[in-house]
Image (tube, rainbow, N blue to C red):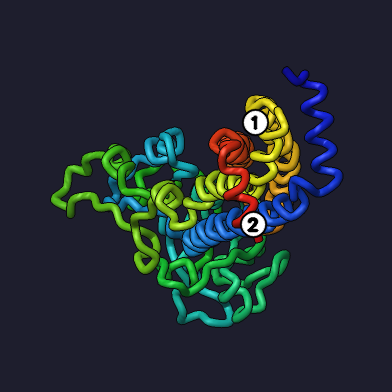
Amino acid sequence: MMRIADAVGEALRNLRTGAAGAGILALLLVVASTTLLLIDVGAIGALQDRARSVRDHAGDVRVLVAKDAVDPRACAALEHLDGVDDAGAIWQTDAVHLVALPRVNVPVFEISSGVARMLRLPSMTPGGVYLSDDLARRWSGQEGSVLATTNGPLTVNGTFLYPDDGRDPRFTNALVVIGDSPSRSSECWFSVWPATTATDALAYGAAVASGRADAAPQIAPLNPTVGQLFDFARDYRSRLTAFAAPTVIVLFAVVAFAGCHRRRLEFASNLHAGARRRDLVRIAAIEAFLWAILSAAATFGLTRLATRLLLEEHVPGLLPSLTVTLALAVGAALCGATVPALLTRESRLFALFKSRL
């Protein structure tokens, strides 16, 4: 019986001389496997872009509306719920009048820190006002400038992006101040991610009885044009390119099988010369393991580099999943390589010789 060291030496000689055709097989696997996995990485990147677009257009923000019936403390406590990133109340206060436009009522909204984070205000400075970028351009009200109003000067603490993309337009032409009033408000904003309506039932708890016959509390998206339901976890699981990982495993097995299948004449000849079948299987398995592990390592490196370049956000479990896939692929290559060595018979030697190309 051939020792392991001898089998390894024979496999290495076959690889060095090119008898195993390992170079072509490895190159084919690296190119094909990396291409398949990059297609999947591209699909994941597209999902990330979609999710980012939803958040950029305030698709994650929902608004509880209950006239003078929102408890600001209960509203702020919503951020402790699973899936809720931020929450906070807003209050509409008395309008102001610019000295330059005395007949124009400029609405003023006082917002809590949670809403300030949702609006992505550049700072949390009290005592001044914030303007939307569009209003700041029209009024030339940049950070640090002073607005002259009939109630006195107001310092502009900064500006924030509030595009006209379908979201509630009130903040486009309003002054925003940061505060934390204990009085009841009429609106509670909360950011839910992943975006879902499942939290709505709990959010209604921020509304208290007003004692008046006002309309019942309602919850609506801040930007209804974006939509309300986004199941990106389901989209990730059901993406069309999810076939890439199992296909890579099958590809390793098929390429290894094909590579050894063309060597049946060699196997039959060795059996005729007195070689043991178990030794042939062992050598074929060692050869397959060596070139398959190198192919898997190259594929892993290229795919990992691609994920860093193509994905802006880390996907938990992606690299461990890739590692498991390539480990299974190496195992599949071992199985595929040993099948021809197991099935080739010595009695087929002359038939294989006559049918050779």
Left/right placement of residue 17 relative to residue 357 reads right
**Viewer-nearest residue: 286 or 97:** 286
Instruction: Tell me where residue 112 appears, x and y as whole percent.
Output: 50, 47
**Which label was assigned to residue 281?**
1
Mark carried by residue 356: 2
Quadrant where the image shows the C terminus: bottom right
Mark 1: secondary structure: helix
The amino acid sitting under disc 1 is Val
Neighbour tally class for label 2: few under 14, some 14-19, many 20 plus, Cα within 10 Å: few
User: Between 208 and 79, which is closer to the camera in this rendering?
Assistant: 79
Q: Position of residue 245 (x, y in %)?
A: 54, 47
Quadrant of the image containing the N terminus: top right
Q: Is residue 317 visible?
A: no
Percent position of residue 74, x then y: 37, 36
- At horizontal 35% and vertical 40% (from top left) the residue drawn is 71
Residue 287 in sight in this render: yes
Question: Which residue is drawn at the image coordinates 69% and 70% (left, top)?
Answer: 142
Q: Is residue 46 left or right of residue 35?
A: left
